[in-house]
Image (tube, coloured by chain):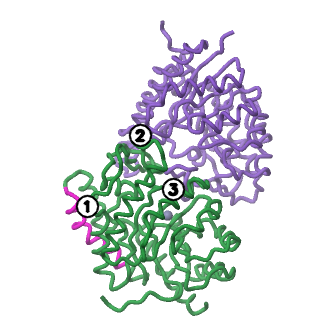
Chain colours: A green, B purple
Amino acid sequence: MSGFEVPKKFPTTVVGSYPKLDPAPEVLRRYRKREIDDKELHELIKPAIKEVINDYLWAGVDIVSDGEQSREDMVVYFAERMKGYTVGDWVRIFDNTYFRRPVIYDKVEWKTPMTIEDWEYARSISQGRPVKAILTGPYTMVEWSFDLHYKDKREAVLDMAKVMRREVEEYLKRGVKYVQIDEPALSTRPWREDAELVKEALEIIFKGVSAKRIVHICFGRLERILPYILDYPVDQFDLEFKNSNFRLLPFLKEYGFDKELGYGVIDVHSLQVESVNEIIKDIEKLMKLDIIGPEKVYVDPDCGLKRLPREIARAKLKNMVEAAKIARERW
Amino acid sequence: MAIKAWSSVLGGFHRPRFLRHALRDVEKGTLPLGLEEELLKVATAEVIGAQLASGMRYVTDGMLDWHDIFRPFVEAWRNVYPDGLLRYFDNNFFYRIPIFRGEPEPSKPILAPRVRAFKELIEPAEMKVVIPGPLTFTLLSKNESELPKEELAKSIAKALNMELKEAVEAGAKAVQVDEPILIDPYLSLDDINIIDDLFKVLFEGVDAFKILAFYFGVPKKDIYERILNLNVDALVLPLAENPKGFLNLVKEHGCGDKIPVLGIVNARNIYDDDYQHVKDLVKESLNTLKTEEVGFTTSSWLDLIPYRYSLRKTTILGKYSEILSKELGFDYINPLKII
Ligand SMILES: [Zn+2]
């Protein structure tokens, strides 16, 4: 390992997913057709992960991910690898794009490490840059599955949290530094009851965890749930800002936000590459409000980059890193 | 006199596999020209058949080619463009945000050609067309025009009014307007205040059975009171997803002079709905509502569950409505009833 050190101020990171790079689409197609098994999948996907890491290194991102190259979908991937699930039918996500919404038919249980291999490989080639462990949150897993076993959402979510906790333990054994739980479904149901359920789940997942604990939530009406989530047992909230035009900022101020913030400055739904200047101005919006210091601000995109063309994703990251460098001098 | 009862699926269906593949081939440019339309007709006939066989009084064409509820209109109107994806309410489904750069100018009708194409197949049931409501359309879009929001909303209502008039002229007997934004707990009073005017524009000269639908949640009380004053004939109450919330609403506020259309079948899960539970809900609602006519429907469109379940839920809706009507002594209208 080289002696890479994460910058003390405005470290840059990613939320997790990256466009599927060759040979990932073909490997996933073969996996879907059962031509290759899980072991072969993780072996054959390596060149794609390497390409992702190369892009991150080229752009200069500090804390990276494996690009989720093996994950066709953030829910299906995990559903296929734990007990209690069966393969679902196709359901539309947008336009003419579908995912096989998995079906819970029995108690969910951890079976085997689900995400470790890709993470370890990414770590072996990231030139000392830490690689985030990224897991789909239990609430999102349950919300985006069909449930034929638990009739009670809470019970399902808490069981799912135990599965994810078990996976986190695999990471802890291997010295993980950053663990991120993705809960995009939460912002779609901005009710206190649901926010509190996620808190219970996070308590299970993060109990006694000394690695950096992160929860990622994106889109929807984040300001509505903000008051209910501030006491989550996490070190960092990784949130989307750019796409909603930084609407959330005054609320952070109002509620006295004082944790670390993954600050989304790249719109993953827009093909337009944010300029360095634009990103600096967006960082300034946060700094002007004097909510948290620069050592608590992690500069990153709003969400995963998977739906962007590779060249655009790369260009966006490059400008983001440039902007963070300049920000380090200014604040 | 016995209560008149009927049923109708709320909206669109999921796409069957062959249509999904055909549409994908269209994108790739590998499908022979014209085949897409033929396959769409076949798929449409299938979902129409399912509705007829299940005894639906009002039948939709399933809207199988719509990528989202706004898209066909966005694509047919000048000055409007589909943009990035945004989550559609609390679903893991995304619509493309319509961007308005000016007043929408319809370049071709969307609904009328479909009515003409399918109304014969639908007989003796009647055709229902579905449109996004002007308030939801406006609030889920981005306004990059010079127009203030209210003006833009009115121009959308006007364009939709043309759609409805042409559809009714072509033979549609029922029009359903979807305003899911009404369940948004943060919907501002300023926004809801324009809805009366919008509906006046929307329904001007539209001579058909008018249904207002909202779903994915329960509207707040003050919003619901406003809804009761709108100029529609029937009001969808999607009981299945939020039974308590809706029972409380109707107990407190009734449903005015509107015909209640009870959403008794949950369109967002894949369970077979529990019949006894459905029956209890219907009894409890109708004890309060005192109506001469009642409709039964699904709690939302059937496009968010796999295809086979969208057909199964249609069957459940038909069966339950019919048995329920028998048990509760309603006069059930099944256009296809033979004996
Ligand atoms: Zn996200």
Looking at the picture, which amino acid does disc 1 mark? Val
Q: Secondary structure at mark 3?
A: helix
Q: Earlier in the sequence, mark 1 or mark 3?
A: 1
The chain to which mark 1 is attached is: A
Is label 1 in contact with label 3 (beta carbons under 8 Å)? no
> Do pointers 1 and 3 mark residues of a single chain?
yes
Magenta stretch, overall SS: helix
Residue at x 58% of width, y 64% of height: A229
Q: Amino acid at mark 3?
A: Ala
Q: Nearer the viewer, residue A21 or A204?
A: A204
Residue A44 is a magenta residue: yes
What residue sits right under mark 2 in the picture?
B306
Residue located 30% across and 88% down the image: A1
Residue B1 - label: none
| Mark toward the viewer: 2 or 1 | 2
Percent across and percent down for residue B209 are 68, 25
Q: Which residue is mark 3?
A: A185
